Image (cartoon, rainbow, N blue to C red):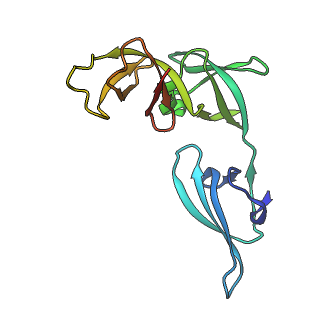
């Protein structure tokens, strides 16, 4: 248990509604009445964001989420297989948990897995990854309008918009937060 006066953004709380991460909190002391703490919480499993209010100095259950580096090995019918880089233990993660991160995972890539009570609860990717372009239509001369883009398919199957000068076989850097092209490598 931790007091609501001692919480910080990024901490995890095990509330009756589920496992939540604190996005923002504010300690409020109104002119009349008792002080309270207003928090913006993000459900770690669903991604839903909600606002909750607690009394000041109320105890809330703190969840200890272990984050450690893992290497992505392969994908099969059981899910995505990862290996812990510290003790070399291997386990499969459900595809629903990996979700959109699958678009950026290459065999051998290092990611951070969040584990709560021995169960993986989230995959955290680096801010950007480098992926090879496997299919790109050629840019047509005369289409070189400033800022023009074309769709390309990356080696993971992800389709993104890139500038016209990017060709098949090029390696591009992609932002994993929004899926946008950053630069050609």
Q: Position of residue 125 (x, y in %)?
A: 59, 31
Q: Between 181 and 29, which is closer to the camera in this rendering?
A: 181
Kindly tell me whether residue 145 is visible in this rendering: yes
Quarter-wise, where is residue 53 in the image? bottom right
Kindly tell me whether residue 117 is visible in this rendering: no
Looking at the image, is 50 positioned above or below residue 175?
below
Looking at the image, is 32 positioned above or below residue 138?
below
Looking at the image, is 25 positioned above or below residue 75?
below
Quarter-wise, where is residue 1 in the image? bottom right
Q: Between 29 and 149, which is closer to the camera in this rendering?
A: 149
Q: Which residue is most to the left?
A: 142
Tally of numbered tags: 0
As drawn, is 59 to the left or to the right of 98? right
Residue drawn where x is 51% and y is 33% of the image: 176
Residue drawn where x is 69% and y is 52% of the image: 13
Q: Position of residue 75 (x, y in %)?
A: 53, 16
Residue drawn where x is 53% and y is 46% of the image: 47
As drawn, is 75 to the left or to the right of 1? left
Residue drawn where x is 66% and y is 82% of the image: 30
Q: Which residue is most to the top?
A: 169
């Amino acid at each position: 248990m931790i007091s609501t006066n001692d919480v910080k953004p990024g901490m995890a709380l095990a509330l009756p509604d589920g496992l939540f991460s604190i996005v923002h909190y504010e300690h409020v002391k109104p002119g009349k009445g008792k002080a309270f703490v207003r928090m913006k919480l993000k459900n770690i499993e669903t991604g839903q964001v909600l606002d909750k209010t607690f009394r000041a100095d109320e105890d809330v259950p703190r969840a200890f989420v272990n984050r450690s580096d893992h290497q992505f090995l392969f994908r099969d019918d059981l899910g995505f297989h990862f290996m812990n880089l510290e003790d070399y233990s291997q386990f499969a993660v459900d595809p629903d948990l990996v979700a959109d991160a699958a678009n950026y995972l290459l065999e051998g890539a290092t990611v951070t897995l969040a584990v709560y009570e021995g169960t993986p609860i989230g995959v955290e990717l680096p801010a950007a990854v480098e992926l090879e372009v496997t299919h790109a239509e050629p840019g047509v001369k005369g289409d070189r309008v400033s800022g023009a883009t074309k769709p390309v398919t990356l080696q993971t199957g992800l389709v993104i918009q890139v500038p016209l000068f990017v060709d098949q076989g090029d390696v591009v850097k992609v932002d994993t937060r929004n899926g946008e092209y950053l630069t050609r490598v």
